Amino acid sequence: MEKKSIDNNFKLIVNSIKNEIRTTQIKTMQEVNSNLINLYFKIGKIVLENKKYGNKFVKEVSPELKLAFPNMKGFSERNIRSMRLFYEEYCDNEKWQQLVAKLPWGHNLLLISKLKDRDIRKIYAKASIKNGWGRTMLAHQIENNFHLRIGNSSNNFKNSLPECDSDLANSIIKDPYIFDFLTLKENYKEKELESAILEKIKDVLVELGKGFSFVGSQYKISTDNNDYFLDLLFYHLELRCYIVVELKTTDFKPEYIGQLGFYVTAVNEVLKKSGDNDTIGLLLCKGKDKLTAKWSLKSINVPIGIATYELNKYMPKDILEKLPTEDDLNLHIDI
């Protein structure tokens, strides 16, 4: 018994040390990045102050810096010109300087080149920091108009949740969701959509946003005489609540609200613990009439959001059926 206790304590101690190391690593990386962004900002200022020398100045500065600091990258003529643009963009606003110092250099260049409106740019800068988007994901979100989709769902959160939770829930739910990484044949069924989502659950979680933790699919909840199966069940770490997701391959219909409302209540009765907030329902439909959705939401007192989704990749059924399965690809053939 004593050895088991020592083993358990040892694991706790080691995990504590590991967490401290990871936290320090993250802080160190953030500090290094912030220092680099501030350096580029200062270089940009110097370049701008000496613009009277024209392009010749940058052409001569670039090789000097490369020679003096051979182990550092980023001193190409093009990048030094970007530093000047970077300084010009934010020299008049200290809050912006603090914000962009939290982003990698590549992210900053992407935001400046793709988004001229600063208010819109700020949405992506903050979302990128919060969600840990890489540069490719940031570009993808810009291309898919993240700023127009976030907080755009039809919902009754304002009337069914406390104000702080209502605002947070509204800011988390998108409309539409872009599942362009799913490949389905046309006229797909709900079960096929669910299976495709499960196969790409990591990509789905990225599209849903930071905080969503996958609990299960076809999650069973039982009463005395009946079993009910929830399409997808998540737990949101920031909202501290379960989120029930129902999938529909048709446009929104008012009767969908009653079904999802029952599932939300069931999760509250069966799974919700004392530290959890009220469960939220998310109905994903192929399309919706906003007025119909608005009226339907007024008839229910549990928090529900209605959003649409888009699938950009379709494949003809005859081709899809001829593709090798994952098991086929994993077959080992001896020659």
Image: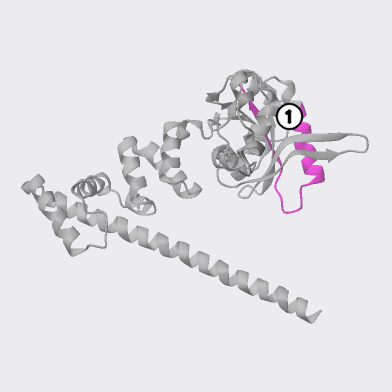
Q: Is residue 288 visible?
A: no
Identified at 42% across, 41% down, the residue is: 136
- Whether residue 278 is in magenta: the answer is yes
Provide the residue span drawn in magenta: 259-286
Residue drawn at (47%, 31%) of the image: 148
Confirm whether the magenta stretch covers residue 83.
Answer: no
Looking at this view, name the residue that lies furthest to the bottom: 2
Residue at the image point whose x is 15% and y is 51% from the top: 47
Question: Residue 307's image quarter?
Answer: top right
Q: x and y percent of residue 280 in the render?
A: 68, 38
Residue depicted at x 73% and y 24%: 256
Quadrant containing the N terminus is: bottom right
Left or right side of 28 for 73:
left
Percent across and percent down for residue 219 are 77, 40
| 58 or 223, nearer to the observer | 58
The crowding category of the residue bearing disc 1, from other C-alpha atoms within 10 Å (few below 14, some 14 to 19, many at least 20), is some
* Residue furthest left as drawn: 53
State the quadrant of the C terminus: top right
Q: Is residue 222 above or below residue 192?
A: below
Q: How far from the left and from the top, in percent, is residue 330?
A: 63, 42
Residue 72 percent coordinates (x, y): 26, 60
Residue type at numbered disc 1: Ile
Please name whichever residue, 320 or 185, is drawn nearer the observer in this view of the structure: 320
**Is 8 placed left or right of 332 in the picture?**
right
Circle 1 sits on which residue? Answer: 300
